[in-house]
Image (cartoon, rainbow, N blue to C red):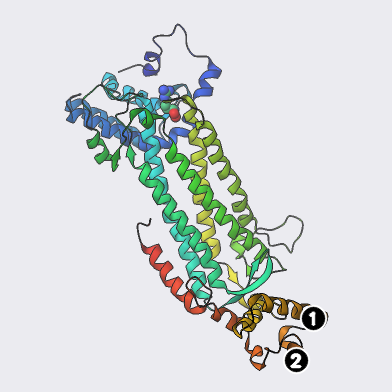
């Protein structure tokens, strides 16, 4: 059996002394890249099987390597594996343990491979897995939004621009706006998958490997649909990590807008929604408080996800070809982004599902307001007035109504007609209901359109592949 840490010392044969302790700790990545153990072992197993198929190593050696790797995976999963910082990274930790288990045969595994193509492979396997988990979480969240929208299909709320009451909306229409954003996010992740799904193994350190390897065999074993076309690019490319992080940043941005609305809506001033107790936090001093800390934290965590994207873009900027150790800095940010996004989606799904919706309060904030002013202008325009004139008449009417402290419904027909002879009795027929019903065009808030949008949305979530 080989001695402990033998690989490590073999790798330093060109040096006269060992590495400085602080420097050794500085370059080590095992404290975080241990997370790639499954991907690293899967890649090594496929590589060993390929080496045997190509008669680059014997079948017997490949079997020894594969069973050694399988038992290492079990050790890790049972918490029995000791990760050693002095062995730097996940690759060397596993390889060194393989030496302890099967002796010198372990040294054949790294034939026709470099840590540079090995880590590129591990990262791609990790991102592929992350994409599929993210997409399924996103779809779960979309479904929760659709359930709430459907359960409140007829509820009317004030729509806002500049956070000022603008026009009435169906609450379901408002929620469906978030559905659309998230649908684009799903498509972005699925699109990022296409460029991640490329096998880098075979690129070696940078120039390709000098053995008759079968890259297609490995691609098929590991489920990749394509092979990288340039070895230099393959070992130094982290676009797929950046793309995942960019899609995640966009998703977190979308979620943060909804989170902001939930914070506003759950205030006493709005009172549109109430968080379920399970998703609210208390105050240490004010006994009456029901704080939306969960939602606020989700909004706050958007910052770190943006940060991780910016950090990797900056790491990659100006790097000469091919692999440089700077690239090791891709991992912590990616892991953090994946964990943050997935946990945010998980928590928000539960929160949305249990959210109490106060539809009565939504409509009552509209009563007596001038939210139907556009509908009055449309009324005059439909009677033949140019819209700009109609706008100006209704503007003056609003000013008058405010001065009399009256809502539109409280104005007499004479008062209306002082502003325009086009006003007739049917002006009293304009309500929040007729306002939403009037917007009966594709993409509009009319109940008929919203029902159709809900059906379309359900179909989209059901589809496996978009875009
Ligand atoms: N830990 C390294 C990384 O994450 C693996 C590749 C190391 N390659 C090297 N030549 N030192 O990028």
268 shown above or below 137: below
For mark 2, does the 10 Å Cα neighbourhood hold few (<14), some (14 to 19), or many (20 or more) residues? few
What x and y, as percent, mark residue 357?
59, 72
Q: Say whether residue 75 is visible.
A: no
User: Which residue does the numbered mark 2 point to in the structure image?
Assistant: 412
Q: Residue furthest right?
A: 403
Which disc is residue 400 wearing? 1
Q: Residue at x 55, y 44 (%)?
A: 305
Q: Quadrant of ligand 1?
A: top left
Q: Quadrant of residue 125?
A: top left
Task: Give the SS element for disc 1.
Answer: helix
Q: Quadrant of residue 424?
A: bottom right
Relative horizontal placement of residue 441, taking residue 261 as reference (left or right): left
Q: Residue at x 71, y 79 (%)?
A: 394
Marks 1 and 2, how far apart at CA: 12 Å
Q: Nearer the viewer, residue 88 or 272?
A: 272
467 shown above or below 451: above
266 shown above or below 10: below
What x and y, as percent, mark residue 302?
58, 48
Q: Residue at x 66, y 71 (%)?
A: 166
Which quarter of the image is occupied by the C terminus? bottom left
Which quarter of the image is occupied by the N terminus? top left
Q: Nearer the viewer, residue 76 or 465?
A: 465
What x and y, as percent, mark residue 154?
54, 79
Q: Residue at x 47, y 40 (%)?
A: 242
Please report whichever mark, 1 or 2, sits nearer to the chain's N-terminal start.
1
């Amino acid at each position: 059996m080989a001695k402990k840490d033998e690989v490590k010392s073999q790798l330093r044969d060109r040096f006269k002394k060992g590495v400085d302790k602080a420097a050794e700790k500085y370059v080590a990545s095992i404290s975080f890249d241990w997370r790639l153990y499954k991907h690293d072992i899967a890649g090594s197993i496929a590589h060993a099987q390929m080496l045997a198929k190509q008669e680059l190593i014997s079948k017997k050696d490949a079997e020894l390597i594969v069973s050694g790797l399988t038992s290492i995976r079990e050790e890790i999963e049972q918490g029995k594996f000791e990760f050693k910082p002095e062995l730097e990274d996940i690759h060397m930790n596993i390889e060194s343990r393989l030496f302890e288990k099967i002796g010198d045969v372990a040294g054949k595994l790294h034939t026709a491979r470099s840590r540079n193509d090995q880590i590129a492979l591990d990262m791609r396997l990790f991102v592929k897995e992350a994409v599929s988990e993210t997409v399924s979480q996103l779809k779960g969240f979309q479904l929760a939004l659709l359930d709430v929208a459907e359960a409140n299909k007829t509820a009317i709320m004030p729509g806002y621009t500049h956070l000022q009451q603008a026009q009435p909306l169906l609450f379901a229409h408002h929620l469906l706006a978030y559905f659309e954003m998230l649908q684009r996010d799903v498509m972005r992740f699925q699109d990022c998958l296409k460029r991640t799904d490329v096998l880098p193994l075979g690129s070696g350190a940078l120039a390709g490997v000098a053995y008759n390897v079968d890259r297609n065999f490995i691609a098929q074993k590991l489920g990749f649909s394509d092979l990288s076309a340039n070895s230099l690019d393959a070992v130094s490319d982290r676009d797929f990590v950046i793309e995942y992080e960019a899609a995640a940043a966009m998703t977190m941005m979308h979620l943060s807008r909804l989170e902001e609305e939930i914070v506003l809506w759950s205030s006493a001033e709005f009172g549109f929604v109430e968080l379920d107790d399970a998703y609210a936090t208390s105050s240490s001093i004010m006994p009456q408080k029901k704080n939306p800390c969960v939602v606020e934290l989700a909004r706050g965590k958007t910052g770190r996800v943006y940060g991780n994207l910016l950090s990797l873009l900056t790491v990659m900027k100006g790097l000469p070809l091919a692999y440089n150790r700077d690239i090791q800095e891709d991992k912590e940010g990616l892991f953090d982004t994946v964990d943050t996004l997935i946990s945010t989606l998980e928590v928000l799904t539960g929160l949305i599902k249990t959210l109490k919706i106060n539809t009565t309060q939504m409509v009552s904030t509209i009563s007596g307001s001038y939210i139907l002013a556009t509908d009055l202008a449309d009324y005059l325009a439909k009677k033949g007035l140019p819209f700009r004139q109609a706008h100006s008449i209704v503007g003056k009417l609003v000013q008058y109504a405010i001065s009399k402290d009256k809502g539109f419904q409280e104005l007499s027909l004479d008062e209306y007609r002082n502003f325009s002879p086009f006003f007739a009795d049917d002006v009293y027929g304009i309500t929040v209901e007729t306002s939403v019903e009037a917007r009966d065009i594709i993409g509009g808030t009319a109940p008929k359109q919203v029902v159709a949008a809900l059906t379309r949305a359900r179909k989209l979530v059901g589809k496996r592949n978009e875009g």
